Amino acid sequence: MSSNLIYRFHATGGGTPVNAYIVEGRSGTVVIDSTLTVSDGRALRSRVEELGKPLLGVIITHAHPDHHGGLVELVRNLDVPVFATAGVAQVIRRDDPIKEQILRPMFGDEWAAQRAFPNQTVADGELVSLDGIRLRVTDLGPSESPHDSVWALEDSDRRVFSADLAYDRHHCYLADGFHQQWLANIARARQEFPNGVTLHPGHGEPCGTEALDWQEGYITTFLEAVTAADWSDTVAARAGVIARMLDYLPSGRCSS
């Protein structure tokens, strides 16, 4: 059995439910993703400090701000490496000005005035090892966001930080439009994830690979609904797509 413990930090700041994870090793911790808001970033930092071990590093899985907006509060006054693939790091910096314009009116001071960014880039398949916490990255490219990755904890328990590759039965963010790439990455994950793997998703509870099937169904249902709609009446078409998705998942739970 692994000596590494995983803690799920569930944040709801700004009405946007999202997970970060703390991996506790023998003498330190690593955090995967950093939530959206200032308050949740601070609360995540406090949770790390409660464990009484130093923060050794942070991993950012993908380029959506609900997974990196709180980073500046998590690492404030700390000199720690923040890892991401080159593609994830590049998109976060590229999109930061437009995210400022969009998110400042939505969240006010809960959207950090100055953001922090990844400062260490890693290549596909590279291993990050921090005092016995060993995490290997798979670079997915465009998927749920303009650039995604998943990270596997290299221990005997077969645990993967799967980010937003598959939500755990939450309504999903589909606006970036990389639907075919996302579906291809789900198919790839089915082939590459080990048997019995536990996924630690960006939204929802830890789950098994059945979440991949659910996510594939969600995306294909959405694409079918959009294709079938009569967009000469935009209001009716939009309502029809929403109704179809609520048939697939009769829940108001949503994520950004």
Image: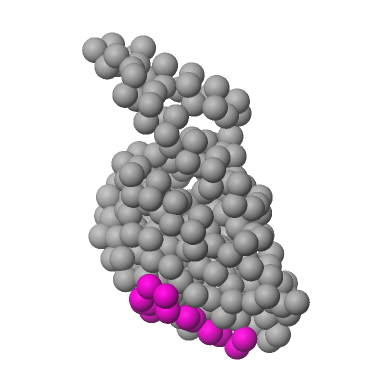
- Identified at 51% across, 68% down, the residue is 151
Magenta stretch encompasses residue 126: yes
Horizontal side of residue 115 vs 91, given as left or right: right
- Identified at 43% across, 41% down, the residue is 173
> In front: 153, or 52?
153
Horizontal side of residue 252 vs 188, given as left or right: right
Q: Position of residue 167 (x, y in %)?
A: 54, 46
> In front: 94, or 77?
94
Residue 54 lies in quadrant = bottom right
157 versus 206 height, above or below: below
100 versus 231 height, above or below: below
- Identified at 35% across, 39% down, the residue is 175
26 versus 70 height, above or below: below
Horizontal side of residue 50 vs 54, given as left or right: right
Q: Residue furthest right?
A: 1
> In front: 15, or 64?
64
What's the coloring here?
Answer: one colour
**Region in magenta:** 117-132
Report if residue 71 is visible in the image. Answer: no
Q: Quadrant of the N terminus?
A: bottom right
Q: Position of residue 216 (x, y in %)?
A: 47, 41
Report if residue 211 is visible in the image. Answer: yes
Magenta stretch encompasses residue 201: no
Number of numbered discs overlaid on the protein picture: 0
Q: Position of residue 157 (x, y in %)?
A: 68, 70
Residue 240 lies in quadrant = top left
> In front: 228, or 78?
228
Q: Position of residue 121 (x, y in %)?
A: 36, 76
